[in-house]
Image: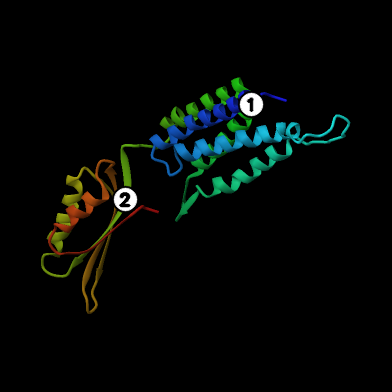
Amino acid sequence: MLAHSELLLRVATGAALGGAIGYERGRHRRPVGLRTHVIVALASATFMIVSSQFVYYQRFGAGDRVEVDASRIAASVVSAVGFLAGGAILRSGLSVQGLTTAAGLWLVTAIGLCAGAGMYVESSAVTLLGILALTVFRRFEDKNDLVTKRRIGVVLGDGDETESSTHAVMKAISDLGADVVDVEYERRLDEKPRTALTLDVSLPVSVTVAALVETLEALPNVKRIQISQPS
């Protein structure tokens, strides 16, 4: 039977190491950040010490025969975290996002279990390797945290100024420091003529959605604006 101070140290170590992974995820503006990773690692470490130590707190008699599977709760944690990690995975069109975040949650679960088992060196080493994988290997991927991607839909009123309005929209977006990746042009010729532009752009992260909307609203002949994440 371990002392309460040792058990609390294991839980605190798991939470701190999980927080290190969560801090890296939060810096890169991922939807699952510091708090979630800390809680997952904290819960995993707690489940681990419960799994290995709970029998000592049940006040069984000296002659009682008790059979305990110390791995049962820990094994259930590994299975259960799959549902939590699955919630971080998003599919938009043909692209899938959140796989790295889901893998990170799986990783901090392992780190929490490791710390809960008293394997401080191993849990610290795994945390270091995880941070290296998330930061160093990121440089080999097409990632840029200074740029965000947006899909901008603009509907222009019909008239002789439609062409000039189109150029004005393109110029306004370029003046914000955006790179236009793709453009779709659609013109309706029915009873309510309209011209629609759909632009996939890469914007500096300093440009907020509010600033983008304000810029486009100030342009003449703009009837509708829609901003979303590209699929």
Q: Earlier in the sequence, mark 1 or mark 2?
A: 1
The kind of secondary structure element at disc 2 is strand
Which residue is denoted by mark 2 in the rendering? 150
In the rendered structure, find residue 4 and report the number of the disc placed on it: 1
Front of the two marks 1 and 2: 1
The kind of secondary structure element at disc 1 is helix
In the rendered structure, find residue 29 and report the number of the disc placed on it: none
> Residue 218's x, y, as percent?
14, 57
84 left or right of 71? left
Q: Disc 2 marks which amino acid? A: Arg
Q: Is residue 189 above or below residue 178?
A: below
Crowdedness near tag 2: few (<14), some (14–19) or many (≥20) residues, C-alpha within 10 Å: some
Q: Disc 1 marks which amino acid? A: His
Residue at 12% from the left image edge and 59% from the top image edge? 164
Q: Nearer the viewer, residue 228 or 105?
A: 105
Q: Nearer the viewer, residue 155 or 85?
A: 85
Residue at 35% from the left image edge and 37% from the top image edge? 145
> Residue 48's x, y, as percent?
66, 34
Cα gap from disc 1 to disc 2, whole angstroms: 51 Å
Q: Residue furthest left?
A: 160
User: Quadrant location of residue 2?
Assistant: top right
Residue at 27% from the left image edge and 44% from the top image edge? 203
Residue at 61% from the left image edge and 24% from the top image edge? 5
> Residue 185's x, y, as percent?
26, 61
